Amino acid sequence: MIKTPCLILLCVLGGLTGCSSAPERDYQVNTYQRQASAWLAQGDRKRQQGAYQQALQYYDNAYRYASKRHDVAQMGLARLKQAAVYIKQGQGELAEGKIAQAAEFVRFEHTELAPAIDFMRSKLAFSRGEQAQAQALLSKLQAQYSEQSEKQVYYRWVGWQYTPQRLDWLQAEQDMQLLAKMKADRTLNNIEILSFVIYHNVLWRVTFEHHDVPQAIETAIAHFASLELTNKLVDCFEIAVQHYLATGDTARAQYYQARLAELASSGH
């Protein structure tokens, strides 16, 4: 009868550190980690929508929560995602600063950010017209991920973006079929890779006057509609107008022009 009150007293005097209301077996708290991940995801969504200032802010929020946990992987990822936005906006110096911050985590911590840093440096070099440097870094990544088909496809298509004259249409169609199958099988890890491929497929088919443009336009519109990326729908409608005007299909060109006007009036 005396032991129980003594135990309660010991718990109070010990600041409750030795007493738990429930057994803990994970021994980790991941509240900040979840919050950082949520902000990264929201930042990605805004970046895909073209809302770049919001994306930068959300990535800052992700960095702040990751920093509270000293999660250097998430911290570096947040900075690299900001670098991607700055490259898109043509702000190379700001992008370089964010890449340098991520590189510090590789230098002083155990992270797996090095490939992502190489890729961002490749994109930055390409944006600055440093073609050889951009391609060298990309070739390194292609060799590094030769056994991972999804990333291999992505880096191949980025390579074609760098040097369109190397575009292999037979390989391109095989890549699209592969990604479509992976999506259907629910084994596709990154939907942005499929988005990149689908958009550039239609863009390049129109640019190089390749065949099957109408099908490519329909595929791209259906894809971005399913993701509710209105800004990319606008891009697809603009490509459609360009194509159908060039081929003399005035009715279709006017249809897509009307869709563009509707989205513009709604503030898309």
Image: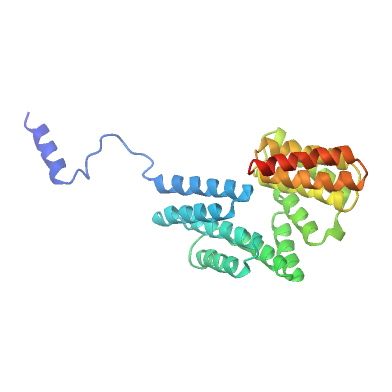
User: Which residue occupies the foreground of this view, 44 or 179?
Assistant: 44
Quadrant of the image for the C terminus?
Answer: top right
Residue 9 visible to an observer of this rendering: yes
What is the image's colouring? rainbow
Image point 49% across, 48% down: which residue? 39
- Viewer-nearest residue: 116 or 198: 198
Percent position (x, y) of residue 9?
11, 40
Residue 194 visible at all = no
Residue 96, quarter of the rendered image: bottom right
The image quadrant where one finds the N terminus is top left
Q: Where 38 falls versus 90 (above or below)?
A: above
Q: Residue at x 65, y 59 (%)?
A: 88
Depicted 250 relative to depicted 129: above or below: above
Depth check, front residue: 56 or 31? 56
Number of marks: 0
Residue 133 image offset from top left, x and y in percent: 72, 70
Q: Residue at x 44, y 54 (%)?
A: 66
Specify whether 12 is left or right of 183.
left
Residue 2 on image: x %, y %: 6, 32
